[in-house]
Image (cartoon, rainbow, N blue to C red):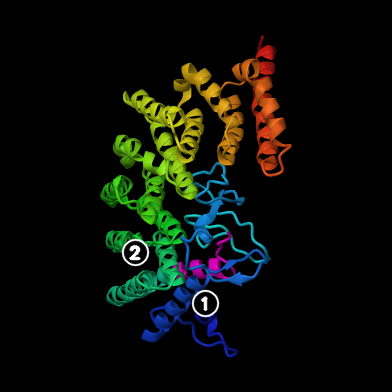
């Protein structure tokens, strides 16, 4: 803000001469970049349960750390860990929405970037204070330099900026690495002459973020920045998607189960499918074959990230006419049924299959009609499970079964489902899911009644 005041009128009281990026000394821009980049790093603080500003926990993969949280993107947070004691619901494509912020105090910014909606899935992580203004100020600063500096001077300026971002990315401090990712995401949309070089450089920087020890919140931020990058990458998009899909699938197939990489893989695949669907379409068969280890991962958060990736893949299939569509749906259906009916199936297999069934009901159209009875009876029978996460998933699936075929559901399964849900709301630990499901069920059946009324009016 001080720089903008100086540029507008000398800043002081004497009506000084107007300054621009062309007139500024060589250290002025460097000092401003330092302040802006460090401001982005400071914006990675979060509010704890008591509303106090704190620093992102470093031990992200510990059982009691960030990875023990199951985060619904609508802002609701449920406890869940390796024991699968919680489950969160639906989400939408990350770049088609603005990040929402629950927040524990005034002035909480919903995300640093309007361009990508970069709000983190990591529990109470938020860009706080002046974070949003700092991100936008960084972009404005670079845009002003591109506009006002001579070509040679701007090239030196960008080399300096790239070096600073790379040092942040390679820092041992998680806040600095997140700040570097934020800077990349914010600068992706900046128009400059060397756009191809910028996209290539940023793709390389983000690629180096996904290490075997990459913290979950860093993986979320970097995957979203990567999705933003391929969305505006132009001719480079195909090459970036090809490279990232290949690497992500290798991580999913790897026999040595590295949790950080498996989690990063499904985050990346989701963003690529969402932001470059045309290019991703050729990788659909490989994705369908590779996603199952993540859908059955012991970690709840990995399973939930995997089902969000599956959702985006199904949207890609749904939007394109292809003769292989039914073949892909059938492959998914068979794997899902196998996870539910296999002898000795563990809780992770059952839960992952229930999550997948929810997406098949939403995104495969008429394919599920002939299989509706088998699916409904299998799902309802699983409510007798001793595992709370399985019972909760069944509770959440009931409204989806009703929405898929309201009339058939009302005729055959409504009575049993209503009894099941009424029993759920009597349990203190499952009551929230029960009430939500009852509301969603009523809405699904009410839509059918409205359609019937419209048909009667037409007659």
Residue at 68%, 36% (x, y): give it. 434
In the image, the segment drawn in magenta is 124-140
Q: Quadrant of the N terminus?
A: bottom right
Question: Few, some or many C-alpha atoms within 10 Å of disc 1 (few <14, some 14-19, many ≥20)?
Answer: some
Q: Nearer the viewer, residue 286 or 206?
A: 286
SS of the residue at dot 1?
helix
**Residue picked out by circle 1:** 4
> Is 254 covered by the magenta stretch?
no
Q: Is residue 98 visible?
A: no
Query: Of 196 and 356, which appears nearest the observer?
Result: 356
Q: Is residue 154 left or right of residue 81?
A: left
Quick check: marks 2 and 1 in contact, CB under 8 Å?
Answer: no
Q: Which residue is mark 2?
A: 192
User: Residue 262's spot in the image, x, y percent?
Assistant: 37, 50
Mark 2 or mark 1: name the one nearer the start of the chain: 1
Seen in the image, is 439 located left or right of residue 257? right
Residue 63 - label: none
């Amino acid at each position: 803000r001080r720089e903008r005041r100086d540029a507008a009128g000398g800043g002081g009281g004497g009506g000084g001469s107007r300054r621009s990026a062309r007139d500024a000394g060589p250290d002025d821009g460097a000092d401003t970049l330092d302040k802006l980049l460090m401001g982005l790093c400071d914006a990675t603080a979060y509010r704890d349960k008591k509303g106090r500003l704190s620093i992102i926990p470093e031990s992200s993969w510990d059982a009691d750390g960030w990875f023990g949280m199951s985060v619904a993107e609508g802002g609701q947070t449920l406890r869940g860990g390796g024991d699968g004691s919680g489950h969160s619901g639906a989400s939408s494509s990350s770049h088609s929405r603005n990040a929402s912020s629950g927040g524990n105090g005034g002035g909480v910014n919903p995300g640093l970037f309007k361009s990508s909606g970069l709000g983190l899935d990591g529990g109470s992580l938020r860009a706080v204070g002046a974070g949003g203004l700092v991100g936008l100020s960084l972009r404005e600063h670079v845009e002003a330099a591109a506009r006002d500096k001579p070509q040679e001077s701007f090239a030196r300026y960008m080399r300096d900026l790239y070096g600073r971002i790379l040092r942040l990315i390679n820092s041992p401090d998680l806040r600095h690495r997140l700040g570097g990712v934020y800077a990349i995401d914010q600068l992706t949309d900046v128009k400059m002459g060397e756009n191809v070089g910028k996209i290539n450089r940023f793709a390389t920087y983000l690629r180096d973020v996904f290490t075997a020890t990459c913290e979950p919140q860093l993986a979320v931020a970097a995957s979203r920045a990567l999705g933003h990058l391929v969305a505006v990458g132009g001719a480079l998009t195909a090459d970036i998607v090809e490279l990232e899909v290949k690497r992500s699938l290798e991580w999913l197939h790897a026999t040595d189960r590295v949790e950080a990489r498996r989690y990063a893989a499904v985050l990346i695949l989701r963003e690529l499918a969402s932001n470059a669907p045309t290019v991703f379409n050729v990788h659909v068969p490989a994705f369908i074959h590779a996603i199952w280890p993540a859908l059955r991962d012991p970690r709840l958060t990995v399973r939930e990230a995997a089902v969000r990736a599956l959702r985006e893949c199904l949207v890609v299939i749904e939007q394109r006419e292809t003769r292989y569509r039914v073949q892909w749906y059938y492959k998914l259906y068979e794997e899902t049924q196998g996870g539910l009916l296999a002898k000795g199936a563990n809780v992770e297999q059952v839960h992952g299959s229930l999550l997948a069934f929810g997406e098949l009901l939403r995104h495969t159209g008429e394919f599920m009609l002939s299989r509706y009875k088998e699916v409904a009876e299998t799902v309802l029978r699983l409510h007798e499970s001793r595992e709370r996460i399985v019972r909760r998933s069944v509770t959440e699936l009931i409204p989806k079964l009703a929405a898929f075929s309201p009339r058939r559901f009302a005729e055959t399964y409504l009575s049993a489902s209503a009894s099941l849900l009424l029993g759920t709301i009597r349990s203190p630990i499952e009551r929230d899911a029960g009430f939500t499901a009852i509301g969603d069920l009523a809405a699904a059946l009410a839509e059918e009644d409205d359609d019937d009324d419209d048909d009667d009016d037409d007659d």
